[in-house]
């Protein structure tokens, strides 16, 4: 592996750093979604979870767009160095040219592989986040009591603020008719 890093030039290190960041984010997201699935009441996303389902998306998007560009830049720089070395020797050496070009393509390959990995991760995480939001919204709509059964203010005294009998529809066993059977099993098991 050291020979690939050396052949790829100085931009291999930033690419490897981006690869580590991407891998760390993907692993953190896997842990997040695993914990969310194991939670007792999975259908109700709290404010923190609602914001956290798309955490680090901007970072993954930045890696997705910058990795191929860094790889191409590394390739161009390495090809330039190869041509400079051949020009300095004064004689065209086809073997040196082929070895130099082959090494120069290494950053492009790493950049493209990193971009593919990150693209797949972004798409899967975005799909999971959209699904969680949809199901949470369906659950919230199904758990909301009908208009006529909502608590009405009770005025004991005109000078006191109205008191509202707040009872959670979830604790009352609200209807989950808006959810599919699969969603009910997933979120209420």
Image: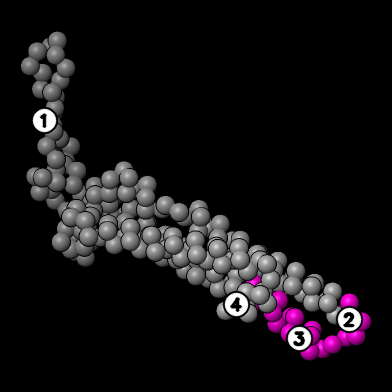
Q: Which residue shows up at 69% across the image and 79% down it?
A: 103
Mark 4–mark 2 Cα distance, whole angstroms, equals 26 Å
Q: Earlier in the sequence, mark 2 or mark 3?
A: 2
Q: Which mark is residue 2?
A: 4
Q: Residues within 10 Å of mark 1 (few under 14, many from 20)?
A: few
Q: Which residue shows up at 57% across the image and 79% down it?
A: 1
- Secondary structure beneath label 4: helix
Which residues lie in the magenta part? 87-108
Mark 1–mark 2 Cα distance, whole angstroms, equals 89 Å
Please state the horizontal and vertical placement of residue 124, each as a whole percent of the image.
41, 65
Mark 4–mark 3 Cα distance, whole angstroms, equals 19 Å
Q: In terms of secondary structure, what is the magenta stretch mainly? A: helix
Q: Nearer the viewer, mark 4 or mark 1?
A: 4
Task: Determine if residue 82 is in view.
Answer: yes
Q: Which residue shows up at 38% across the image and 60% down it?
A: 29
- Secondary structure beneath label 1: loop
Task: State left or right for residue 117 relative to residue 84.
Answer: left
Task: State left or right for residue 90 relative to residue 74.
Answer: right
Q: Residues within 10 Å of mark 2 (few under 14, many from 20)?
A: few
Residue named by callout 1: 165
Q: Residue 186 falls in which quadrant of the image?
A: bottom left
Mark 3–mark 1 Cα distance, whole angstroms, equals 80 Å
How many callouts does the rendering have? 4
- Secondary structure beneath label 2: helix
Residue named by callout 2: 89
Q: Which mark is residue 98?
A: 3
Task: State left or right for residue 8 relative to residue 146.
Answer: right
Q: Which one is nearer the viewer's eye here, 188 or 54?
A: 54
């Amino acid at each position: 592996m050291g020979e690939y890093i050396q052949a790829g030039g100085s931009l291999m290190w930033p690419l490897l750093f981006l690869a580590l960041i991407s891998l760390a984010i993907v692993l953190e997201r896997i842990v997040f979604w695993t914990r969310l699935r194991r939670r007792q009441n999975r259908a109700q996303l709290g404010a923190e979870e609602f914001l956290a389902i798309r955490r680090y998306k901007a970072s993954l998007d930045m890696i997705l767009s910058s990795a191929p560009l860094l790889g191409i830049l590394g390739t161009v720089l390495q090809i330039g160095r190869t041509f400079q070395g051949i020009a300095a020797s004064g004689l065209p050496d086809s073997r040196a040219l082929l070895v130099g070009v082959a090494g120069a393509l290494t950053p492009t390959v790493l950049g493209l592989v990193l971009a593919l990995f990150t693209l797949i991760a972004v798409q899967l995480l975005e799909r999971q986040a959209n699904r969680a939001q949809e199901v949470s919204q369906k659950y919230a709509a199904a758990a909301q009591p009908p208009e006529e059964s909502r608590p009405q203010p009770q005025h004991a005294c005109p000078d006191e603020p109205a008191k509202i009998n707040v009872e959670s529809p979830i604790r009352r066993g609200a209807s989950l008719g808006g959810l599919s059977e699969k969603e009910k099993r997933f979120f209420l098991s």
